[in-house]
Amino acid sequence: MSKDQLMFGAAYYPEYMPCERMEKDFQMMKKAGINTIRVAESTWSTLEPRDGEFDFSFIDRILDEAKKAEMSVIVGTPTYAIPSWLAKKDPDIMVVNRNGREKYGRRQIFDLLNPTFRRHAERVIRELAAHTAANSQVIGFQIDNETKHYDNRGPEIQRRFKEYLKEKFGTTERLNQTFCLAYWSNSVADWDQFPDIGGCINGGLACEFEKFQRKTAAEYLWWQADIIREYKRDDQFITHNLDFEWKKFGADIAQDGYSYGVQPGINHYEAAKCLTKTGVDIYHHTQDLLTGAEIAYGGDSVRSLKYDNYLVLECQAQAFKYWTPYPGQLRLQAYSHLASGADGVSYWNWHSIHNSFETYWKGLLSHDLEENPAYEEACVIGKEWKEIGSRLIHLKKENRTALLTDNNSMAAFQWFPIDRDLSYNDVVRWMYDSLYEMNIECDVVDVNGLDADRYDMIVTPALYCASEELIKKLEAFVERGGVLVSSFKSFVADEYSTVYHDRQPHLLHRCFGMSYNQFTEPGKAKVLGAPLKYFAELLKPEGAESLADYEHKYWGKYAAITRNSCGSGAAYYIGCYTEKKVLKMILKQAAEEAGVCGPAAEYEWPVTVREGINQYGRRVHYVMNYSEDERSVNCVWKEVKDLLTGEIFRQGDKAELKDWGLRIFEEI
């Protein structure tokens, strides 16, 4: 795969197959246009069947076939699923979490800090890297797989956490004061009194421990990356498949859900620092529920970690019964990833597995291992990408809107919920999806990585935990001309989840021109004729314009949504959970004031537009139809060429969109 060729790939595990078919697999992959496979990340027990006994015969055969097929290979370090002999060697390898010590069987159930695990993990990484790095087909390494902290509460992480607190706070007096540990007699007079975190009743201290857990997970990836750097060639990358919160919508089984929002088990911004190429796993609704929002959110999030292109290392082909794609959907999904800035996609996985845990997480091939409609559609994608991929790869985005996310706020809401039926990620997706449906593209930015000068509009969904440094940065952003849009439960507490003891929103009540000191269940209240759900803050304008008051006998004297001029900019505050149509009205006003609405704002979902500049300096517009209905849209650009068909369109011309179809317009 050349540097200007889109990756089109699949995870490949011939070790799992009930019959020998490697040669046929490569023939079928080649026919589909697949140019990259990912191997090894799941098969430690095959690579090292006994302690110190290595067998790379499967890897060698794959690399030989890949060379014949002129196919690239990403080698994964096989450390996220340990072999049984290792678990037996040291029982303390199994992680101690809130439910006690895990039993061997599933993946990701070990203590990342255990020295026995680390010693053996380092050995297999070194052996594998030394064996494969010089091979011409190997283009990069994936370290571990969807890494998180696995709720590690074992003795070693608790010992390290106490040392972290000692270094950070210095004295127990400062620790007690920061987290209000006097409550329920939880204060400690010296460090030896510090208790097991498993019984912690203090939300702020528990959130600090979760921050430390996330830090240990990121440091574990840094450790692996440092090992790989000793072996890899200069032209090989280091990546990792970051993933998101898994949203369940049915029975409590792993297959029942989809990628949803901020990942609670690791901080992506921290973890990505050790990567030379960011990677991501994105799974989403399909069939009648396909909206493209999960693809867009995941892409906007991972792209913004380094403001660079990324690889989709896992996405679905068929998977479960409710993910079997309608005709055209697999193709639309693939292009949707590119429209967010991906440099290619890889399916999990190539062939369906015939036994074990993920038997019915179907691959690109079904259990009969023959051609099927999904495979045939993949062949279409592969053919098109060979023809026009050079005009789609390395798409650069110039978004002037940022949506801020925060792991600390997410953790705090586990302790202090907004509502039992409304999570932090629900609020994130409520605001993100509204922007997405309005065709206002945004970067999804971790608060620790915010460069406010890049943006004209910043949106903060439920930014509960906000340091004074961040608050002052946002106030300065508004004063110099930016537009800030914040939701309820923003700027309530500091970085340690301690609620500020002055007017809410802290330090920003003058910027927003309002304050509040009461909040409520909305009950029968409405805003702009629309009912509310979950939560409502009773806002008192202090110079701000009320864009909507509560429609309620008792709460009617309070504002629900406000706008205030501050310096050269403006600050909008949405104090309640509204219907999307109301939220979109406010976001539209704010976006127009910020000047971030482009021609694509003429369209609205299910016609979605994603834009960027290709490597030739041409502006590219993906116009996608997330609907079973054919649609006709106006061309809103001066003159464009559809890269898929070669047709020329000028402003005002009608362009037809097939069901689950798209146009890729390159400006002429």
Image (tube, rainbow, N blue to C red):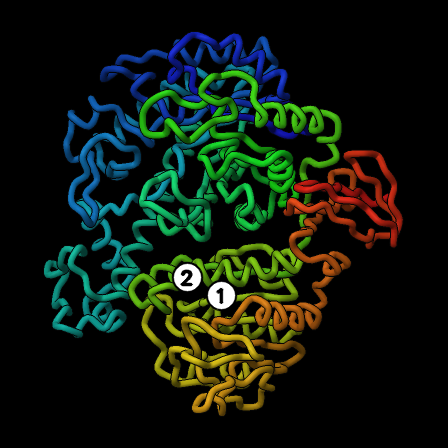
Looking at the picture, how far across and down is residue 361, in whole percent? 42, 31
Image quarter (top left, top right, bottom left or bottom right) of the C terminus: top right
- Give neighbour class at mark 1: few <14, some 14-19, many 20+ (Cα, 10 Å): many
Secondary element under disc 1, as helix, strand or loop, is loop
- Judging by the rendered image, the residue that carries numbered circle 2 is 424
Q: Is residue 447 left or right of residue 644?
A: left
Q: Is residue 477 left or right of residue 352?
A: right
Residue 625 in the image: above or below residue 26: below
Q: Is residue 86 left or right of residue 521?
A: left
Of residue 489 and residue 260, the one placed in the foreground of this image is: 260
Of residue 277 and residue 579, the one placed in the foreground of this image is: 579
Secondary element under disc 2, as helix, strand or loop, is helix
Q: Residue at x 49, y 34 (%)?
A: 314
Image quarter (top left, top right, bottom left or bottom right) of the N terminus: top right
Of residue 39 and residue 315, the one placed in the foreground of this image is: 315
Looking at the picture, how far across and down is residue 163, in whole percent? 22, 53
Marking on residue 429: none
- Of the residues shown, which amino acid type is indicated by label 2? Tyr
Q: Residue at x 65, y 52 (%)?
A: 606
Residue 621 makes an appearance in the image: yes
Marked residue nearer the N-terminal end (2 or 1):
2
Looking at the picture, how far across and down is residue 136, in whole percent? 56, 15
- Judging by the rendered image, the residue that carries numbered circle 1 is 461
Q: How many angstroms separate mark 2 from mark 1 (CA)?
A: 8 Å
- Give neighbour class at mark 2: few <14, some 14-19, many 20+ (Cα, 10 Å): many
Q: Residue at x 64, y 39 (%)?
A: 332
